[in-house]
Image (cartoon, rainbow, N blue to C red):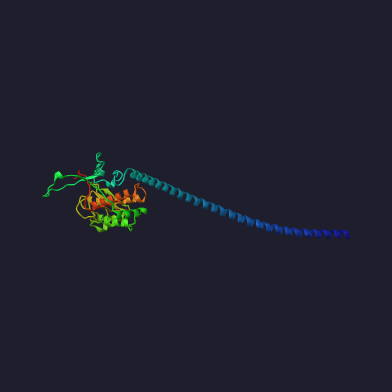
Amino acid sequence: PWIREKGSEILREQLDAAQKELKLKDKECERLSQVRDQLEQELEELTASLFEEAHKMVREANVKQAAAEKQLKEAQGKIDVLQAEVSALKSMVLTSTPSSPNRQAHPQLLSPGTRSKGASPRHGGGHTRNKSASWALPLAPGGNLDLHSLQPVREDKEMDNVLYAEFLTWKDRPSLDRTSAFLGRIYREDIGPCLSFTKSELSQLVQNAVENNSLTIEPVAVSALPMVKANAIECGGPKKCALSGMSRSCKHRIKLGDRESYYHISPSSRARITAVCNFFTYIRYIQQGLVRHDAEQMFWEVTRLRREMTVAKLGFYLTDTDQG
């Protein structure tokens, strides 16, 4: 009996120990189960967040790609336009110089009516120029023309050192800044007087548009004159110049930048504006490095353009002789 009791006691102790160990295992299992649930929940949240972030990144990438493709397309269009402009400029520089202009490449140099009627094959459009000689007309006593004394004379020229020095200084760093001695003199002596019309306010607007390269000159269609928003005094008309205010036949009109108004101008006013535009075109070519001449040739071309502004200011201009 003693042995049986001793065996039972040992078994109970082992059973209690097993039960305690089982409870510890249960607690450990419960703790691990909680950890597993927590990890699963965190994993689900992380997965959802990653998917949401991935979708967001894909959307942003698609938007950026679409914007980039649009910008690329616009840039390619601009490049095509710029390449066409560069090709046109190169063609003008190679085939035309301001002293011997290609009048088809520079339509603003055409005389009124040439654009619509076409150029004469013999004269190349517009007019011819005597490049080396002119004729002096001497008068005999009493004011009569002395035909026996007619002699051909050649125009000669001599460089002004002061003007040339100003040009060379400007040419080293060419710009359109009128504070330079070179451009300041030309503004004061040529551009200002040439663009000084009776209508001073409109004259300043014209000068600003010429400086900004935003002025447009176009022929007026006689059959259908367009309606404009500005009043008739400011815009002139087919019989009244908007710049001078004088009654003249106005076969051209100007548009200033983005303004919606058109201003009718007389042939004399057109010649004055065109002379200034030609000067600005040439110095812009120099500034952009498109003129392949030496400094002295450039200077004489600038001087010739200054003379054209002076001649236009004095009221001289070229026109077709077949226009009534």
Return the x and y of residue 112 as percentages of the image width and height. Answer: 24, 46
- Residue at 52% x, 52% y: name it: 57
Q: Quadrant of the N terminus?
A: bottom right
Image position of 147 (left or right of 31): left
In the foreground, 183 or 229 = 183
> Based on the displayed image, in which of its 4 quarters is residue 40 positioned?
bottom right
**Residue found at the very far right of the displayed protein:** 1
**Residue found at the very far top of the displayed protein:** 121
Image position of 158 (left or right of 19): left
Q: Quadrant of the C terminus?
A: top left
In the foreground, 223 or 264 = 264
Q: How many circles with numbers are drawn on the protein?
A: 0
Image position of 189 (left or right of 172): left
Return the x and y of residue 110 as percentages of the image width and height. Answer: 26, 45
In the foreground, 140 or 271 = 140
Return the x and y of residue 205 as percentages of the image width and height. Answer: 29, 56
The answer to whether residue 254 is seen in the rendering is: no
The answer to whether residue 33 is seen in the rendering is: yes
Return the x and y of residue 320 as percentages of the image width and height. Answer: 21, 44
- Residue at 73% x, 59% y: name it: 24
Vertical relation: 179 (above or below) 226: below
